[in-house]
Amino acid sequence: MKRRTLLLSLLTLSAVAFAAALFIRSTSAYGFAGPSASGHGTLVLPDGRKRQFSFNATQHADGSVTGHAVIHNPDFDFRSHLEITCLLVSGNRASFGGAVRSSTDPFFEGQNGFFTVFDNGEPGKGNDTISLVFFDPITADACVGIGPNDFEQIPIDSGNVHVRP
């Protein structure tokens, strides 16, 4: 009887340890993401034109980056959707790059777009900044060579930007 109880106890303990190992492995794959950034809002250009934006990007434990950005210029009814594949975060600055997956202007589809934001605290309005999106038909990796001061920053007029190192 003692042997049977000991064997059942060992089997139960082994099953619990196996389940715990699976749980720890699955949470480590999803729970420990690296740097990320997200935001949305409107900015008014010096000439009075408005631009709307929305973006998110996360660097995963394996180094890959996933995310999306949508930019909209209502003056020209221009809309573009980028699949974000690179992210550089340094302090409160995030730079992004990725391929244009769809656009109201077919010229931009397939090109790479890149931009930079600064999270300068709360509230976002008047504090946080974003650059215009720059398009490049040649650069394979839009994050290569992006420096902290490469793009002129424009304060956002509504919305918020969050950068998490």
Image (cartoon, rainbow, N blue to C red):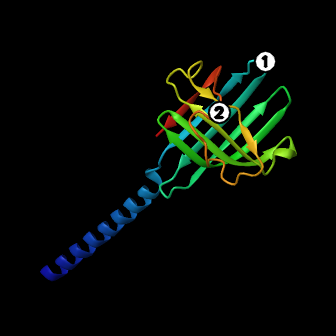
* Quarter of the picture holding the N terminus: bottom left
Question: In the rendered view, would you say 29 is above or below 75?
Answer: below
In this picture, residue 103 sits left or right of residue 84: right
In this picture, residue 53 sits left or right of residue 64: right
Quadrant of the rendered image containing residue 54: top right
Mark on residue 20? Answer: none
The residue lying at 59 percent from left, 18 percent from top is: 126
Residue at which label 2 appears: 151
Name the secondary structure under disc 2: loop
Residue at which label 1 appears: 47
Location of residue 33 in the rendering, given as x and y in whole percent from the top left corner: 47, 49
Give amino acid for label 2. Answer: Phe
Give amino acid for label 1. Answer: Asp
Quadrant of the rendered image containing residue 135: top right
The residue lying at 81 percent from left, 27 percent from top is: 74
Name the secondary structure under disc 1: loop
Location of residue 6 in the rendering, given as x and y in whole percent from the top left corner: 17, 77
Q: Nearer the viewer, mark 2 or mark 1?
A: 2
Location of residue 68 in the rendering, given as x and y in whole percent from the top left corner: 66, 44
Question: In the rendered view, would you say 21 is above or below 87?
Answer: below
Density class for disc 2 (Cα within 10 Å; few <14, some 14-19, many ≥20) is some
In this view, the residue in front, 98 or 25, is: 98
